Amino acid sequence: MKTVILAGGIGSRISEESHLKPKPMIELDNNMPILWHIMKYYSHFGHNDFIICCGYKGFIIKEYFANYYLHRSDVTFDFTKKNDLIIHNNVAEPWKVTLVDTGINTMTGGRVKRIRKYVEGETFMLTYGDGVADVDLRALIAYHKKEKKTATLTAIQPGGRFGTIEVNNRTGKTIFSEKRKEDGGWINGGFMVLDPGIFKYLKDDNTIFERQVLERLGKEDELTVYKHNGFWQCMDTMRDKSYLDGLVEKGEAPWMVWKK
């Protein structure tokens, strides 16, 4: 099953880094791009055929994969022998990566529409290029097949950013507690499975997948939700990045299952 990754947005809320590169190419712990982390996670479950929807500074993503061996291997440049290049301990991935220019200002639904010819007739997975999780992909796919809907999205409950304060007006007693995940509603965490019928809902480049498409699917009873109670985190801001960096540095990143 092919995996489509949305990697074309500008990422304005993390502009400290995204003014230099696409958000999916921002590195975690100054090491590998979050896009690589996402691909490694899917690959762990045997999904190695990727279609990446490029847009803003997409050439950086293309150059990264064009020079993947150089990024991941030891190399020798021998200038005494006509500039010979020797690659040592060649690091390879079992991946097929299709990079598609889906436009700078194209909306999410429009980006999916543009890769139609690469997935025509097949059920495929779709996710965002800035979020990691420990979703059980086998269970997700099995759930999608059982429900027989056009689309399945993974719902998560993000943790609250702030603790809560309760003051008893009668006694004056103050109670502070960290906001629990259950205090918030369920949101779309990506990690979606889509049947080919999804393309009839995609009109043009201005189609917003999360708005026109998912809302219409819900009204037509063609949308189902797989609830994930485990780890999930997007990298929307520098605060998010610092949190993810810390997990990687401490060896406590739940999505890095290939390390176990």
Image: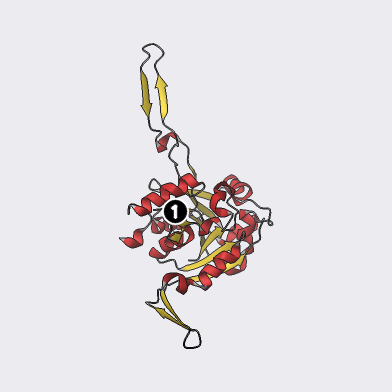
Residue at far bottom of view:
81
Structural crowding at the residue carrying mark 1, measured as other residues with C-alpha within 10 Å and reported as few (<14), some (14–19) or many (≥20)? many
**Image x and y of residue 215, in percent:** 60, 46
Could you tell me if residue 246 is visible in this image?
yes
**Image x and y of residue 114, in percent:** 64, 63
Left or right: 18 in relation to 169: right
Location of residue 238 with respect to 168 vertically, above or below: below
Residue at left offset 68%, top offset 57%: 205
**Image x and y of residue 35, in percent:** 48, 60
Q: For numbered disc 1, what is the local secondary structure?
A: strand
Left or right: 116 in relation to 181: right
Residue at left offset 38%, top offset 32%: 178
Residue 248 vs residue 146, the one in the foreground: 248
Residue at far front of view:
80
Residue 240 vs residue 103, the one in the foreground: 240
* Quarter of the rendering occupied by the C terminus: bottom left
Residue 113 vs residue 20, the one in the foreground: 20
Q: How many marks?
A: 1
What amino acid does circle 1 point to?
Answer: Val
Residue at left offset 58%, top offset 62%: 53
The residue under label 1 is 132
Residue at far top of view:
170
Could you tell me if residue 121 is visible in this image?
no
**Image x and y of residue 150, in percent:** 55, 55
Q: Looking at the image, what colour scheme do you see?
A: secondary structure
